[in-house]
Amino acid sequence: MSSKTFLWIEDRKGKASYIFWNCLVKQLYPDIIVESKKNNSELVKAVKALEDTENRYLIVFDNSFDNLQVAMEQKLLKLEKRIIRTLRKSLNTMSILTSTI
């Protein structure tokens, strides 16, 4: 099975942001599937529940300075991503060390 690439956005279908991303992506990368998660809370829930390792997911938040929740969620997601990267490096290092013993 070939992997797919999804672009998840927080705006509803029919809203300006969804229309913009859908038009842009269809012109530049027609294979990317644009999906609406309706709002930033639902988008965050979908990202946190994501367990799919076969496909790629591009996550787009509206970077509004007046939207404190989006800013906080972005920081949390970045932190979680750093933690996962650090854990993977540690596990990889442990694997290398145990294989040389």
Image (tube, rainbow, N blue to C red):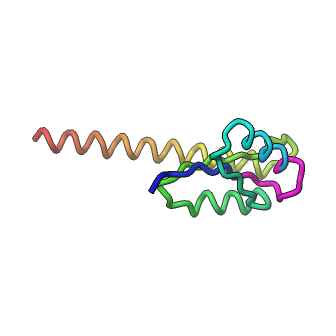
**At 84% across and 42% down in the image, what residue appears?**
64
In the rendered image, residue 92, in percent from the top left (x then y), is placed at 30, 42
Q: Which residue lies furthest to the left in this view?
A: 101
Picture quarter with the N terminus: bottom left
Q: In which quarter of the image is the C terminus?
A: top left
* Number of on-image labels: 0
Camera-nearest residue between 73 and 51: 51
Image coordinates for residue 6, horizontal then vertical, percent = 63, 51
Residue at 82% over, 50% down: 18
| 42 magenta-colored | no
- Left or right of 19: which side holds 87? left
Segment colored magenta: 8-18
In the visual, does 15 lie left or right of 88?
right
Compared with residue 79, is residue 37 higher up or lower down, i.e. above or below?
Answer: below
Q: Name the residue at 84% across, 48% down.
A: 19
Q: Give whichever of 28, 93 is nearer the camera.
A: 28
Looking at the image, which residue is at 50% across and 59% down?
A: 52
- Across and down, in percent, residue 97 comes to 19, 40
In-front residue for pair 93/33: 33
